[in-house]
Amino acid sequence: MKQVKALAGQTIVYGVPSIIGRLLNYLLVPLYTRAFSTSDFGTVTSLYAYVSFLNIVLTYGMETSLFNFSRMAEDKKKVFSTILTSVTISSLIFLSLAYVFRFNIAAFVKDPTHPDFIIWVALILSADALASVAFAKLREQNKARNFAIIKSFNILIYILFNIFFIVICPKIYADPNNILYGLVQHIYNPNLGVGYVFISNVASSVITLFMLLPTMSKAGIHFDMQLWKKIMPYALPLLLAGLAGMVNETLDRIILLYLLPDDIAKQQIGIYGACYKISIIITMFVQAFRYAAEPYFFAHSKDEDFYKMFADVTKYFIIGCLLIFLGTMFNLPWIQYFVGKNFRSGLAVVPILLLANLCLGVFYNLSMWYKLAHKTMYGAYLTIFGAVITIVINVVFIPKYGYMASAWATLICYAATMVMSYITSRKQFPVKFDMPRIGLYFALSLTLYLTSEYIHIGSTVANLIFDNCMIVAFAVIVYLVERPTFAILKKK
């Protein structure tokens, strides 16, 4: 119980800036979906889909490698310096190539009139790659508070710049009598439109990198080629796994761009992307948990009761995800207003994507077995297996069903990889999960959700009260079932 509580505490510290930041960032969705057309928002969504892939490429498994090799090395500084130097060199090469080929890349992503977007995205990616190594070091050192503070500033800066360029500047620019008109006229170009989303991101990423310089400077300038040669065979399968994982997570938005007619493709991507934002409520929890859990599991992997602790943590993690699923779906009647009216036609994807992200969270948790066993190729095999499912379903069904095919492909992919990870881990990772109770909680939550879908007792307010009472009922049932376990753990 002490270890579970410690991990829960770390999750909260990591999660507060992530959740609050995502919520604040989430509040930008109403702004975007009202300030931009579905097509313009589709441009943002599709470009950030490429960003997700390239983030994996530019970090190429080095975050997890830092945790793994730091726990085994006597000189942790050498590990940090070698990894940071490697990522710095590769990021500079990438940035140079992006600048040289910006016109070709802009044409490839079907936005040939904005090669400047490509340069801004490249700056974001390069800065974030370096920052990811520094953030990983803070996690490895259990400096959750420093991590949380810097992450919070990153999010705050991004939001403030968005508000400044998308809300404040247009109002001032439209009023020549405003005292700030002269200043805004020099820094604001109304023709850039969605470009200010990327400019805001550049500002937040670069400022965050400067805030991380004290951490990065402690690495010194040391590059151990022999150590790097040991790291890369461990890291590269994680790169493959990460890329395949991004295929599962974001390729649908790219495929939609090419498989749907040009006159509706970006509109459909915009609608799908906006409604996808609602489903990331579970993703926020998963991300916060991963920030805390990954270094924690590495640090305690040799503890005598590690497997028991891992099983308990997994069960409580699933319970948390199910509560978020029910909370989101039962409150969707008012949550839907976070996206503009023109985007709400895509709300049917929300429950599908929520369940998909729940399965993804469990898969991430199970992935510890191959990371601890130094068998990272299994991660590549599993995610490539999922990527094949994603590609096949999207290619076959998008022309007929549009983004609904993408949502179902995501759920089927994540559910399949979760099950396969569990099956393949049995020999390598002898954890006795409490499958009867986990199955009970899944069945109970889905029963309550279907009850809400098919039983309507009156007005919207009455239904909201009834549905939220069912969340309380779920929590009470979980507590009653788990109470004997809590009592045993406390005695221990």
Image (cartoon, helix red, strand yellow):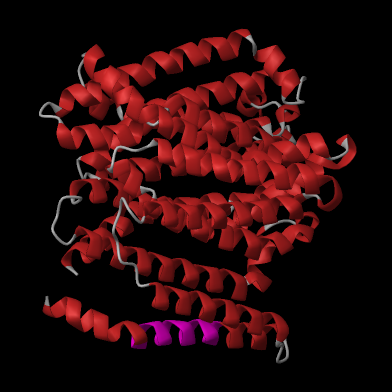
Residue 296 at x, y percent in the picture? 24, 50
For the question of whether residue 359 can be seen, the reply is yes
Of the 4 image quadrants, the one containing the N terminus is: bottom left
Asked if 246 appears above or below 308 in the picture, the reply is: above
Left-right relation of 111 to 378: right
Residue 135 at x, y percent in the picture? 32, 36
- For the image, the number of numbered tags is 0
In which quarter of the view is residue 27 placed?
A: bottom right
Residue nearest the observer in this picture, 393 or 97: 393
Determine the residue located farthest toward the top in the rendered image. 100
Left-right relation of 383 to 179: left
- In magenta segment, residue 306: no
In which quarter of the view is residue 488 placed?
A: bottom left
Residue shown at 39%/48% (left/top)?
367
Residue shown at 77%/36% (left/top)?
257
Residue 357 at x, y percent in the picture? 54, 56
Residue nearest the observer in this picture, 270 or 73: 73
Magenta stretch secondary structure, dominant: helix
Determine the residue located farthest toward the front in the rendered image. 427
For the magenta stretch, what is the residue range? 468-480
Residue 310 at x, y percent in the picture? 28, 60
For the question of whether residue 38 can be seen, the reply is no
Residue nearest the observer in this picture, 147 or 93: 93
Of the 4 image quadrants, the one containing the C terminus is: bottom left
Residue shown at 54%/37% (left/top)?
244
- In magenta segment, residue 476: yes
Left-right relation of 110 to 469: right
In which quarter of the view is residue 196 placed?
A: top right
Asked if 244 appears above or below 125 in the picture, the reply is: below
